[in-house]
Image: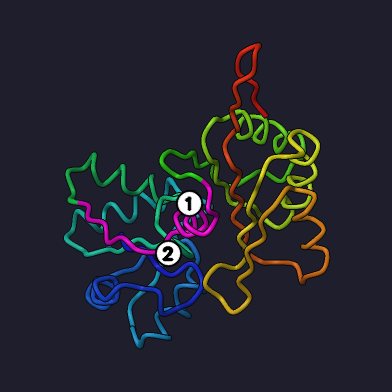
């Protein structure tokens, strides 16, 4: 498996480009996005869709190809495979079948957003993609906000506004970073409270890719013990 860019198409390692030129098949979460990347770098290779539907059947087909000796690279639509995408199913199946698995590391929106946030990252939690349904979103944010460490989540376009509303209501003073369209010409990093970020977002075009970073709880000693916010 190989990491691919999270935005700018040139943010890919030399080893990943070599691998994509040499394999028999590339299994991609989004073949259209992968095809554009391969075209950019002059690579002609057979592509197949992997996810999000019929994963059980697709894993069986790809596993059969692997047992026949085919060299297959699995890639996400952007970033590192398995990070909030269905790649783990094929990887687990390959391990179970005794097929060697290798990783070519590279770009990840998780590490990029953490790095630019300025929040402590000695320990952090990753919460995948925030759900779109408000009830599920509220439950996810309750868990995320209760964590003591910095938290990171991918935020689909339909979840961003209600997520910021909920954070502003539940922890109005908590610092957050909204990292929009990382590594592209539209890259925007907004930092502050949820309300401050909402105000700034209202002045800008809607972002297409958002990674949300929430600072961990502040802990202050008081005469009555620790107070958290």
Question: Which marked residue is nearer to the observer: mark 2 or mark 1?
Answer: 1
Does 176 sit left or right of 126 as displayed?
Answer: right
Q: Nearer the viewer, residue 125 or 87?
A: 125
Q: Residue drawn at (37%, 50%), measured in percent from left and top?
A: 59
The stretch drawn in magenta includes residue 105: yes
Asked if labels 1 and 2 touch by Cβ distance under 8 angstroms, the answer is no
Q: Residue drawn at (42%, 49%), measured in percent from left and top?
A: 57
Q: Residue drawn at (47%, 65%), measured in percent from left and top?
A: 78
Coordinates of residue 26 in the picture (x, y in percent): 34, 68
Coordinates of residue 28 in the picture (x, y in percent): 42, 64
Question: In the rendered structure, which segment of residues is drawn in magenta?
Answer: 101-119
Quadrant in the picture for the N terminus: bottom left
Residue 27 falls in image quadrant: bottom left
Residue 73 falls in image quadrant: bottom left
What's the distance in space between the residues labelled 2 and 1, CA to CA? 11 Å
Does 148 sit left or right of 188 as displayed?
Answer: left
Q: Nearer the viewer, residue 162 or 21?
A: 162
The stretch drawn in magenta includes residue 128: no
Is residue 41 placed above or below 19 in the rendered structure? below
Q: Residue furthest top?
A: 224
Q: Residue drawn at (71%, 58%), measured in percent from left and top?
A: 157
Q: Earlier in the sequence, mark 2 or mark 1?
A: 2
Does 134 sit left or right of 100 as displayed?
Answer: right
Does 159 sit left or right of 127 as displayed?
Answer: right
Residue 85: which numbered mark, if any?
Answer: 1
Crowdedness of circle 1 by 10 Å Cα count: few (<14), some, many (20+)? Answer: some
Crowdedness of circle 2 by 10 Å Cα count: few (<14), some, many (20+)? Answer: many
Q: Nearer the viewer, residue 223 or 145?
A: 223
Which residue bears the numbered disc 2? 28
Coordinates of residue 97 in the picture (x, y in percent): 21, 42
Coordinates of residue 129 in the picture (x, y in percent): 59, 47
Residue 31: which numbered mark, if any?
Answer: none
């Amino acid at each position: 498996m190989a990491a691919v860019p999270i935005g700018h198409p040139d943010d890919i390692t030399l080893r990943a480009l070599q691998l994509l030129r040499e394999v028999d098949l590339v299994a991609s979460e989004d073949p259209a996005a992968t095809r554009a990347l391969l075209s950019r770098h002059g690579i002609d290779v057979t592509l197949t869709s992997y996810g999000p539907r019929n994963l059980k059947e697709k894993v069986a087909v790809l596993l059969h190809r692997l047992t026949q000796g085919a060299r297959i690279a699995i890639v996400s639509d952007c970033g590192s495979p398995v990070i909030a995408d269905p790649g783990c199913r094929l990887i687990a199946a390959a391990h179970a079948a005794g097929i060697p698995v290798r990783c070519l590391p590279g770009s990840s929106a998780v590490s990029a957003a953490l790095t630019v946030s300025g929040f402590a990252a000695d320990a952090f939690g990753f919460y995948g993609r925030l759900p779109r349904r408000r009830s599920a979103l509220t439950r996810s944010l309750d868990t995320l906000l209760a964590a003591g460490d910095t938290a990171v989540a991918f935020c689909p376009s339909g979840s961003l506004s209600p997520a910021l509303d909920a954070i502003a209501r539940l922890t109005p003073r908590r610092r957050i970073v909204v990292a929009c369209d990382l590594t592209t010409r539209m890259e925007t990093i907004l930092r502050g409270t949820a309300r401050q970020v909402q105000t700034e977002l209202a002045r800008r075009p809607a972002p297409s890719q958002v990674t949300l970073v929430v600072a961990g709880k502040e802990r202050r000693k008081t005469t009555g013990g620790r107070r958290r916010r």
